[in-house]
Image (tube, grey):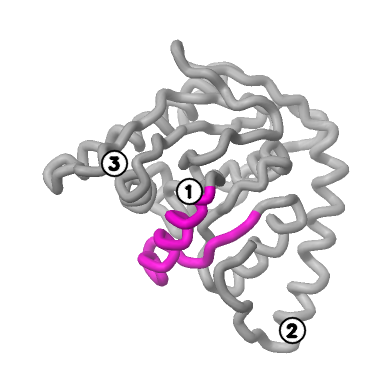
Amino acid sequence: MTTEARPKFTVVQRLVLAIIPRLVWALFSVIGRTWRFEVIAEEGVTPIVFGEISPAKVFCFWHQCVLPCTVYFRHSKAIILISRSFDGELITRILEMFGFGAVRGSSSRGAREGLLGLKDVIETGRTAIFTADGPRGPIYRTKAGPIKLAQMTGVPIGAFHLEPEHAWTMRSWDRFLVPKPFTRIVVSWAQWTHVPTGLANEDFEPKREELNAAIERARLRALAHFGKPVA
């Protein structure tokens, strides 16, 4: 689902939007079947089972693992906040082919509308997902949006990271990960972040740091699982 009509694009952009999502979906529908997922979690945390997300939650992960997350959670019907740009439209169409929905907005443009759209998602019992440091970074620094949404709705925030054992790393701000065929991918879960609806202004930044630390713990635990150095 989307919350608004699609914007107008140039002829070339429309051609790209008509072709690329189908190619990406076809390619990773095949390659994704060769990936082997392994799940780990911090003590006391119950991981979400493969392909499912329990309703009425907020989930956060770093932008670099969008691709394995798309395959792993493809049957969840979760709703993701995506920017209104052309790149955002391209990502939205790809994700829709994998069964996700989208609310359009970002941390910089359309932020309020995006959060209100996700609030509606939560109130209808569905799950909202943030790429916590997206869409422009800085890397490994969560934005304020997830905390604001949790404060508005009273639902907890789950933090996780997907790390491939073998992957191509793009030269982008997020060090985007493209898992290689037949690789193992660890799904690492950290503790939940609980945000009271009456959160005081002076407690907002500590809560954001708490969530940031949780996602980072999930990432570092995933790296350690494969004996990788911290990067």
The image quadrant of residue 168 is: top right
Q: Residue at x 47, y 26 (%)?
A: 218
Please determine whether, in this image, residue 170 is positioned above or below residue 7: above
| Residue 51 is a magenta residue | no
Q: Residue at x 55, y 38 (%)?
A: 55
Question: What secondary structure is marked by label 2?
Answer: helix
Name the amino acid type tagged 3. Answer: Arg
Residue 140 or 106: which is nearer the viewer? 106
Name the amino acid type tagged 1. Answer: Ile
- Magenta region: which residues? 101-124
- Reading the image, the residue beneath label 3 is 208
Of all residues, the one furthest to the top in this rendering is: 43
Q: Residues within 10 Å of mark 3 (few under 14, many from 20)?
A: many
Q: Which mark is residue 122?
A: 1
| Residue 108 is a magenta residue | yes
- The mark nearer the N terminus, 1 or 3, is 1
- The mark nearer the N terminus, 2 or 1, is 2
Residue 3 in picture, x, y percent from top left: 56, 68
Q: Residues within 10 Å of mark 2 (few under 14, many from 20)?
A: few
Question: What secondary structure is marked by label 1?
Answer: helix
* Cβ atoms at labels 2 and 1 below 8 Å apart: no
Residue 10 or 194: which is nearer the viewer? 194
Say which quadrant the N terminus sits in.
bottom right
Q: Residue at x 45, y 24 (%)?
A: 190
Residue 192 or 29: which is nearer the viewer? 192
Residue 143 seen in the current view: no
